[in-house]
Image (spheres, coloured by chain):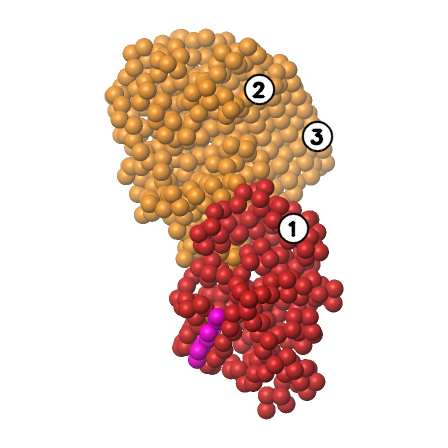
């Protein structure tokens, strides 16, 4: 309930222009030369002082990418991207690698504080450890020592490459192979940073782990890579948040996230994506081309994706689960909001391989303005997946008469004992609902916020508390001015 | 005091209200009775600000405020409450959350401080008890899966919480059994007082046995054709609209 009150406050606070994360941090930066080439790949690898095997891995990906073509099957349209017209590496030009928070440039910490991220470990009440990724590099990670006592590794992937090369080498690209798709392949060649999480056998991670991605520099793409490994019987809840300054240009964000869950392990992965969506005319905004996939390798393992996607000019994202272990469970809970000229083509893939594997998909798409919102999902059941079950529910909510909602479910079932269910609805915010709320004293915007939050409830309740509050606020702000 | 003068309104170019004159002094309860299609619901929607009705003439003021110029939420904030004939379902929105949001919205209009979740629960439980309802009401989603009677009771609960000074009840008695009818009537009677006025719109005299009005008006063909005391309602019940209004 407090969250709704807070939603209202935020809506009022944001009346002056919506996207309040659109500021730019003025800090000395170091860039790679503009453009993309084998030299740039070598430059990035050298900057990070990477071992030869990783440079080779990158170069192999780059060579493969050159032969690939940009996918065109998604229901999104945008001008051809000039991959030579962007920077692939941008980092605060801090010569020394900070060893602790005290050594991090205060200007950077202020940036994160301004975004509402708990950067100081003193803020223990938050119970969240944070890795802060600023453009191409991780600038700080909190609670590392505390977590290390449990044997948990939580650091930037660059650091993991140096400190735990054996783990990185074993798992990198094992869930999302280099050649998986165009954007994942590009990421494999030029990824600059991201988070690395390793939870040892039987350990329940005592706090929420989170990464906060911030694109700051102009004309820069962010290519991060996240790898989470949960050993047998372990549990981790991981959150990510994203924002960027308001700019007229489009910037690219092409991330790869790989999750591995062994026997009885459980990974809960939550995203609140709030990249700059572009202005009301559709100018600017982030192109969010992301590949997220989890492998439930062990028996009874579980991977749960929850996403609230409110930002980005274009979202192309299908967090997926490969249900390999018997009795493993995959979940996908999604709220995707598109307003003005935003386009989202998002959904999931549930690939049932093990016996008695189960998957649940709940997708809530909200479309306003002239936006297009597509759910695209694949449920694939292999012949060996005896007793597999899937339940899919896709609900779309339309606000106004110029937007679109589309549902594209693919079901490939090769197993006679599998059970697959799909439900879909499309509705509008009814005039009588708005009037009912307004006759009780709520403003139009408060009414829309309330109704939309009600529509998304099933998904929002999956989010960790702190994020649920944040997400409710975002929903209200994203839809501001969409009615009447 | 509610003052309506020469009010005319139409929907899609079709005139519905054809010149309503009505005054409800503060502290009084007036009933409007009339056959189907006479404009009863239109009058309640026009007074509470629903879209889709074009006001073509006349005025409606409440305590000197030009009601027709105000947004629906401003009217609510000024003490006007509409109990819906068909309360609307809000899937996924918890009733407690909705009620508290509404209470705080109205308090804010009045310049009163908002109340927190604990204060609200305490207040809501008191009202629920007084209305002989169940706490269960708070846990469910707004009107979703409510029976007809439960929906109407929820309207009365909202009224009790929002403490309006002018309550418009749009056929709140329709579809209610006698027990529910009494609960609704008790809810209204509990609010009766020097600072509370109400416009009770109904088809049947039955409700007026429980909520005894100060005045009764007969609405037919978009005009008030006859006004009188409570005895007018009895005459209508006995002889029908056509005869009484003739």
Q: Residue at x 46, y 61 (%)?
A: B78
Q: Nearer the viewer, residue A322 or A414?
A: A322
Residue named by callout 3 = A356
Q: Circle 3: is it few (<14), some (14-19), or many (20+) Cα within 10 Å?
A: many
Which hue belongs to chain B?
red
Q: Residue at x 66, y 33 (%)?
A: A358
Image quarter for residue A150?
top right
Can you see residue A131? no
Residue named by callout 2 = A206
Query: Is the Cβ of the residue at disc 1 closer than 8 Å to that at disc 3?
Result: no
Residue named by callout 1 = B126
Q: Chain of mark 3?
A: A
Q: How many marks?
A: 3
Q: Secondary structure at mark 2?
A: loop
User: Percent position (x, y) of residue A217?
Assistant: 29, 27
Image quarter for residue B117?
top right
User: Percent position (x, y) of residue A120?
Assistant: 43, 20
- Comes first in the chain, label 2 or label 3: 2
- Of the 4 image quadrants, the one containing the N terminus of chain A is top right
- Rounded to the nearest angstrom, the CA distance separating label 1 from label 3 is 50 Å
User: Percent position (x, y) of residue B75?
Assistant: 46, 62
Q: Which chain is orange?
A: A
Residue A291 within the magenta-colored segment of the rendering: no
| Residue range of the region highlighted in magenta in the rendering | B1-11
Q: Chain of mark 2?
A: A
Query: Is the Cβ of the residue at disc 2 closer than 8 Å to that at disc 3?
Result: no
């Amino acid at each position: 309930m407090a969250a709704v009150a807070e939603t209202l406050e935020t809506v009022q606070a944001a009346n002056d222009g919506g996207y309040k994360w659109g500021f730019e941090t003025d800090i000395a930066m170091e860039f790679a030369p503009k453009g993309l080439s084998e030299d740039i790949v070598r430059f990035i690898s050298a900057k990070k002082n990477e071992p030869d095997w990783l440079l080779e891995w990158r170069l192999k990906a780059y060579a493969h990418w050159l032969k690939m073509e940009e996918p065109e099957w998604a229901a999104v349209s945008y001008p051809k991207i000039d991959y030579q017209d962007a920077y692939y590496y941008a980092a605060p030009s801090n010569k020394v690698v900070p060893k602790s928070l005290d050594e991090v440039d205060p200007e950077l910490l202020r940036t994160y504080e301004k975004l509402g991220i708990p950067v100081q470990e003193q803020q223990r009440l938050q119970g969240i450890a944070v890795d802060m990724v600023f453009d191409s590099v991780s600038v700080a990670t909190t609670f590392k020592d505390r977590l290390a006592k449990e044997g948990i590794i939580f650091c930037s992937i660059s650091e993991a490459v140096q400190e735990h090369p054996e783990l990185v080498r074993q798992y990198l690209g094992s869930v999302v192979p280099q050649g998986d798709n165009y954007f994942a392949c590009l990421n494999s060649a030029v990824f600059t940073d991201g988070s690395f999480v390793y939870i040892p056998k039987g350990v329940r991670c005592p706090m929420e782990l989170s990464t906060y991605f911030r694109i700051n520099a102009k004309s820069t793409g962010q290519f991060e890579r996240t790898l989470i490994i949960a050993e047998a019987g372990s549990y981790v809840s991981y959150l990510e948040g994203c924002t960027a300054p308001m700019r007229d240009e489009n910037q690219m964000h092409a991330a790869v996230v790989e999750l591995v869950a062994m026997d009885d392990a459980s990974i809960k992965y939550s995203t609140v994506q709030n990249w700059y969506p572009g202005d009301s005319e559709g100018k600017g905004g982030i192109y969010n081309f992301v590949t997220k996939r989890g492998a439930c390798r062990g028996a009874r393992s579980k991977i749960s994706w929850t996403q609230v996607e409110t930002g980005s000019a274009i979202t192309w994202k299908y967090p997926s689960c490969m249900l390999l272990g018997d009795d493993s469970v995959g979940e996908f809970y999604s709220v995707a909001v598109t307003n003005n000229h935003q386009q989202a083509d998002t959904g999931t893939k549930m690939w049932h391989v093990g016996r008695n594997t189960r998957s649940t998909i709940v997708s809530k798409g909200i479309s306003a303005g002239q936006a297009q919102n597509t759910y695209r999902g694949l449920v694939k059941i292999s012949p060996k997946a005896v007793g597999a079950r899937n339940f899919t529910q896709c609900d779309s909510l339309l606000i106004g008469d110029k937007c679109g909602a589309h549902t594209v479910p693919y079901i490939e079932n090769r197993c006679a004992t599998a059970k697959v269910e799909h439900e879909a609805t499309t509705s509008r915010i009814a005039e009588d609902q708005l009037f009912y709320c307004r006759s009780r004293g709520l403003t139009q915007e408060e009414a829309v916020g309330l109704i939309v939050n009600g529509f998304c409830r099933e998904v929002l309740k999956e989010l960790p508390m702190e994020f649920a509050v944040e997400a409710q606020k975002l929903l209200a702000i994203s839809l501001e001015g969409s009615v009447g | 005091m509610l003052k309506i003068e020469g009010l005319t309104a139409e929907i899609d170019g079709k005139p519905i209200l054809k010149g309503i004159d009505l005054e409800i002094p503060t502290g009084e309860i007036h009933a409007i009775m009339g056959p189907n299609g006479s404009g009863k619901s239109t009058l309640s929607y026009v007074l509470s600000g629903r879209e889709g009705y074009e006001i073509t003439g006349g005025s409606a003021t409440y305590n000197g405020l030009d009601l027709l110029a105000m947004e629906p939420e401003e009217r609510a904030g000024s003490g006007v409450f509409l109990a819906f004939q068909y309360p609307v379902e809000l899937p996924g929105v918890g009733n407690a959350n909705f009620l508290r949001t509404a209470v705080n919205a109205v308090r804010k209009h009045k310049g009163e401080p908002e109340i927190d979740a604990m204060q609200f629960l305490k207040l809501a439980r008191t009202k629920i008890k007084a209305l002989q309802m169940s706490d269960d009401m708070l846990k469910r989603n707004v009107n979703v899966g409510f029976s007809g009677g439960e929906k109407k009771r929820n309207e009365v609960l909202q009224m009790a919480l929002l403490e309006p000074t002018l309550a418009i009840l749009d056929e709140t008695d329709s579809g209610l059994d006698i027990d529910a009818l009494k609960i609704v009537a008790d809810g209204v009677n509990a609010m009766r007082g020097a600072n509370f006025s109400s416009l009770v719109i109904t088809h049947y005299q039955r409700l007026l046995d429980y909520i005894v009005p100060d005045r009764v008006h007969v609405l037919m063909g978009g005009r008030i054709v006859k006004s009188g005391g409570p005895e007018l309602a009895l005459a209508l019940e006995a002889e029908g609209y056509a005869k009484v209004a003739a």
